[in-house]
Image (spheres, coloured by chain):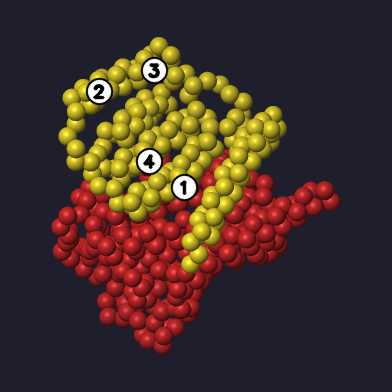
Chain colours: A yellow, B red
């Protein structure tokens, strides 16, 4: 059962990811990316990491993709009308062939679906254990990454501030 | 009864019954209550023609929506135009999947009545209901018209902005309860006090941001009649009705979350649990087969109180201007909710150390 769900989610994740680069309209690509993220979130749940699955939807789909779509809507990007060059057409079909091959390779040879059926401690992947890990053994990396994010935030504020000081209203 | 023997069929039945109840009964009566209460507040009679007390008015409206012409403007993005109403309804239904709404006993263990009992239930509900913003963006963009795209931009900015104080106020509850599980949060309130008394500021922030999240007055910029035309102005017939129903379903879901997080869920009264009541009346309610019925009804009572508050506020307060809305969100609510979160942290640590 879980194995079949794994096949389904992984196949759809790959298919949606392919659609992201295939579709001409950026908004459609964004939607395909949402589909892919949903499937990846399903994979996380299957791998006994429900917290990661929910966070995947909360952050990537609910926050980052919303902003992507928002910006694309503001820019009002038009569908790309240009005809493909020959190598682009060839590359598309080669990718269409290679992607299922890679998917089957990862399933059959690398045997990824064993990740969904391994035996794990009781509270593996729960909010509690993830919190313990993050603020326990990985506390340094956790804090450093939060500082990096803080720097980015302050940077954005400073950059926009400078612009408005140059052109006072 | 093969339905209850097979896990799959049982789950399917439970999902069908629950979502059917939300959409068929709760949303129906919510719309009816909205009209009746608004009539009461404005000293009118309200719907009273169709059926006894106008109870069938919603049915008549539904028939009207179905038989209206489904007009599709020229040059819309065809797939996305049709997809956007579904993008509104889908999260509205799915968000309810992890919300428990009662208590029952299975093999001597207390289990919440819900479609799915997820460990990270609060996070799941919040993350899924935050997906509703896609329908606003897509509907505005796909309509290929200037007013809907402007309305969509404003609505999306509003929803994204108010998600931050909403998340922060919920985080303070998670800190107090020490769990992300709805059942655990209700248990924690049963053991101490309802969180509406323990962190009233959080409840206030939650309420305000929820009003903005569900596009209700005083923050109904996305669909206010006197404002710039909203994101769904190119939609008609059933497609419009889907946006409409999704809004009401969202109201039900967030009110459920509010009841669970702040008002003690299915617990009886603050400081007076079902256990105390069973001792007082001499009937062991917690091991009685009607337990689930009593708790579900009690939960619905609290839920209808919050929903009444939604309607009450809508017909009492005037609408905010858009810049006032944004200023309130970013300059007042976010600092306040951060302060509330830090205050809660201090209180929690103090309670542990004491």
Among the two numbered marks 3 and 2 on one chain, the one whose residue lies closer to the N terminus: 2
Question: Which residue position holds label 3?
Answer: A107
Are marks 3 and 2 in one subunit? yes
Q: In this view, does B278 lie to the left or right of A119?
A: right
Are marks 3 and 4 in one subunit? yes
Among the two numbered marks 4 and 1 on one chain, the one whose residue lies closer to the N terminus: 4
Residue at coordinates 46% horizontally, 41% vertically from top-left?
A: A60
Q: Residue B77: percent from the left, percent from the top? A: 22, 51
Q: Residue B291: percent from the left, percent from the top? A: 56, 54
Q: Residue B265: percent from the left, percent from the top? A: 58, 57
Q: What element carries label 3?
A: helix
Q: Is residue B65 above or below residue A142?
A: below
Mark 2 and mark 3 in contact (Cβ < 8 Å)? Answer: no
Are marks 2 and 4 in one subunit? yes
Between disc 3 and disc 4, the foreground one is 4
Among the two numbered marks 3 and 4 on one chain, the one whose residue lies closer to the N terminus: 4
Question: Which residue position holds label 1?
Answer: A63
| Residue with the most extreme top position | A109
Q: Could you tell me if residue B5 is visible in this image? A: no
Q: Is residue A106 above or below residue B183?
A: above
Q: Distance between the Cα atoms at labels 3 and 2?
A: 24 Å
Q: Distance between the Cα atoms at labels 2 and 4?
A: 24 Å
Q: Mark 1 lies on which chain?
A: A
Among the two numbered marks 2 and 4 on one chain, the one whose residue lies closer to the N terminus: 4
Q: Distance between the Cα atoms at labels 4 and 1?
A: 11 Å
Question: Which residue position holds label 2?
Answer: A91
Question: Which residue position holds label 4?
Answer: A34
């Amino acid at each position: 059962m879980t194995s079949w769900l794994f096949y389904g989610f992984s196949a759809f994740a790959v298919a949606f990811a392919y659609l992201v680069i295939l579709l001409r309209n950026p908004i459609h690509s964004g939607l395909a990316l949402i589909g892919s993220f949903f499937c990846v979130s399903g994979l996380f749940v299957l791998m006994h990491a429900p917290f990661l699955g929910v966070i995947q939807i909360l952050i990537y789909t609910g926050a980052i993709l919303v902003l992507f779509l928002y910006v694309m809507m503001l820019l009002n990007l038009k569908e790309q009308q240009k005809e493909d060059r020959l190598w682009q057409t060839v590359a598309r079909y080669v990718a269409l062939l290679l992607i299922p091959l890679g998917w089957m390779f990862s399933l059959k040879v690398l045997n990824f679906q064993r990740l969904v059926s391994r035996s794990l401690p009781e509270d593996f992947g729960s909010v509690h254990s993830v919190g313990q890990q993050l603020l326990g053994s990985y506390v340094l990396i956790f804090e450093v990454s939060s500082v990096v994010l803080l720097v980015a935030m302050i940077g954005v504020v400073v950059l926009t501030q400078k612009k408005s000081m140059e052109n006072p209203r | 009864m093969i339905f209850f023997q097979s896990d799959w069929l049982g789950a399917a039945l439970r999902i069908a019954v629950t979502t059917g109840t939300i959409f068929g009964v709760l949303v129906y009566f919510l719309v009816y209550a909205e009209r009746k209460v608004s009539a009461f507040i404005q000293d009118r009679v309200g719907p009273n023609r169709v059926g006894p007390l106008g109870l069938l008015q919603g049915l008549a409206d539904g028939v009207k929506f179905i038989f209206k012409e489904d007009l599709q403007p020229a040059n819309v993005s065809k797939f996305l135009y049709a997809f956007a109403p579904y993008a509104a309804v889908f999260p509205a239904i799915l968000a309810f999947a992890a919300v428990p709404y009662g208590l029952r006993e299975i093999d001597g263990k207390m289990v919440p009545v819900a479609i799915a009992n997820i460990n990270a239930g609060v996070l799941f509900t919040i993350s899924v209901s935050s997906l509703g913003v896609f329908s606003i963006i897509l509907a505005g963009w796909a309509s290929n018209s200037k007013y809907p795209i402007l309305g969509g931009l404003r609505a999306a900015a509003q929803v994204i902005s108010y998600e931050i104080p909403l998340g922060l106020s919920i985080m303070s509850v998670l800190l107090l309860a020490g769990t992300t599980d709805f059942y655990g949060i209700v248990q924690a309130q049963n053991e101490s006090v309802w969180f509406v008394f323990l962190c009233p500021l959080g409840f206030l922030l939650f309420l305000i941001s929820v009003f903005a999240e569900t596009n209700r007055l005083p923050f109904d910029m996305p669909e206010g009649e006197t404002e710039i035309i909203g994101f769904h102005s190119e939609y008609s017939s059933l497609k419009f009705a889907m946006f409409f129903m999704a809004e009401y379903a969202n109201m039900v879901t967030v009110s459920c979350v509010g009841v669970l997080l702040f008002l003690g869920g299915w617990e009886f009264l603050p400081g007076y649990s079902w256990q105390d009541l069973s001792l007082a009346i001499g009937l062991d309610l917690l091991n009685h087969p009607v337990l689930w019925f009593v708790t579900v009804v009690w939960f619905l009572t609290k839920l209808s109180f919050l929903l009444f508050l939604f309607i009450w506020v809508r017909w009492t307060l005037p609408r905010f201007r858009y810049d006032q809305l944004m200023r309130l969100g970013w300059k007042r609510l976010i600092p306040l909710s951060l302060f509330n979160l830090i205050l809660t942290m201090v209180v929690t640590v103090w309670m542990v150390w004491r």
